[in-house]
Image (tube, rainbow, N blue to C red):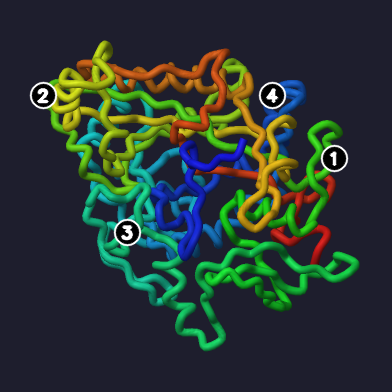
Amino acid sequence: MPYRQLAAFLPGTGVGGAGLHWSGVHFRVDPIELRMRSHYEERYGKNFIPQDMIIQDFGVTYDELEPFFDKAEKVFGTSGTAWSIKGKVVGKGRGGNAFAPDRSDDFPLPAQKNTWSAQLFEKAALEVGYHPYNLPSANTSDSYTNPYGAQMGPCNFCGFCSGYACYMYSKASPNVNILPALRQEKRFELRTNANVLKVNLTDDKSRATGVTYVDGQGREMEQPADLVIIGAFQFHNVHLMLLSGIGKPYNPETGEGVVGRNFAYQNMTTIKAIFDKDTYTNPFIGAGGNGVGVDDFNADNFDHGAAGFVGGSPFWVNQAGTKPISGFPVPPGTPAWGSKWKAAVADTYTHHLSMDAHGAHQSYRQNYLDLDPNYKNVFGQPLLRMTFDWQENDIKMAQFMFDKMAPIAKAMKPKYILGSPKNANSHFDTTTYQTTHMNGGAVMGEDPKTSAVNRYLQSWDVA
């Protein structure tokens, strides 16, 4: 059915895109996850990966990407604590992440100060034997000017971060960190309120010649181009490739085709803790990427053979500013509305915190994107259709992560602990927000039979 009221995820549109309303947690990829299939087969055997799981290597290594991660952090103004720089440990006892890959340079800014809830999480994680660290955040801990000359102000923890644009220019996004420099270029023109309908191709469909778009006045326009970059939100990139006839559409029945293949999401698990009235967490204070995390069960930092599933998850307390209504946890047995509900909200709002496991989600043969055969958008084009549900591996991982995260909550000694993992009957819920971390559908790789673009993100089929 058409998804007319977004809820589970919030794709970006307009100038700045999803960068306007993201939180700002700014990790680097774990080196193992760039060659995930090879690594799991080497360590656990080829039969460990489920048959319907179609994960594959990226075709690039961490060492190849490291200089670009470093450049991106400098453009973003990322705040954080390095663990090791050029092989030398510098972050031990200072909030560095012992599981993080080596770096060529430090973060451009020191880590942000941690909220009280993050400090509680850090203390409890240490008590249960985990290794807490400061989350790297694309929220500035101080004033900053990036390599393009774009200026950022220090984050003031206003609490209106996740889901909002930053009026302090403290959160990295294209309109803050890149557009100010582009505007100085005489050849640059920004056309707002433009909806690209398709990439135009030569008759033999071997080259892109430009795009057709509808402008803010509803006029259909054509823009010729020597180079076309499809750089919208993940969903929109896949949709545009399908509408333009770039790459072979994925067929889940045969397994052939690449555009729409390898779609993945994120496997979330949340625990909420409610404290007595003497413990104030003040959740209205917050910064999007700020917090404390643990990576003991992320990537392949633990034995997956005994656990029996593929994938890992960081745990963290990331107090980004608790929103009205949606952010009111109440004790078990509280009515859903009325005077008793209001009293419970008043008792708990400033005395609670949330901790999350942002679990990796894998690609499966039966989860994919394609063009809807029935429903169309306002321009008369087929809508993008998402076919998706949780699989057995996802449920196993969620249950495992819940069991490993719960001891942190218990060590905090709260009055109530709320939360439960997915179970065998769990299905994807389109009505409740989870994350906007959508992945895949036009993946990179070294084989044109299993990837839509090569290791340089160029289409295999269209130049």
In three-dimensional space, the C-alpha distance between marks 3 and 4, rounded to whole angstroms, equals: 45 Å
x%, y% of residue 157? 23, 51
Nearest the eye: 232 or 114: 232
**The residue under label 3 is which amino acid type?**
Cys
Mark 3 or 4: in front is: 3
What's the residue at 19%, 26% (across, down)? 345
The disc at residue 277 is 2
Q: Tell me the residue that label 3 is attached to.
A: 166
Residue 137 position (above or below residue 222): above
Mark 4 or 1: in front is: 1
- Residue 90 visible in the shown view: no
x%, y% of residue 208? 77, 69
In three-dimensional space, the C-alpha distance between marks 3 and 2, rounded to whole angstroms, equals: 32 Å
What's the residue at 79%, 34% (across, down)? 252
Q: Earlier in the sequence, mark 2 or mark 4?
A: 4
Q: Are marks 3 and 2 in contact (CB under 8 Å)?
A: no
Q: Earlier in the sequence, mark 3 or mark 4?
A: 4
Q: Tell me the residue that label 1 is attached to.
A: 256
Question: Which type of secondary structure does the marked residue at label 2 adopt?
Answer: loop
How crowded pointer 3 is (Cα within 10 Å; few <14, some 14-19, many 20+) is rated as: many
Q: Are marks 3 and 4 in contact (CB under 8 Å)?
A: no
Q: Quadrant of the N terminus?
A: top right
Q: Earlier in the sequence, mark 1 or mark 2?
A: 1
Q: Quadrant of residue 337?
A: top left
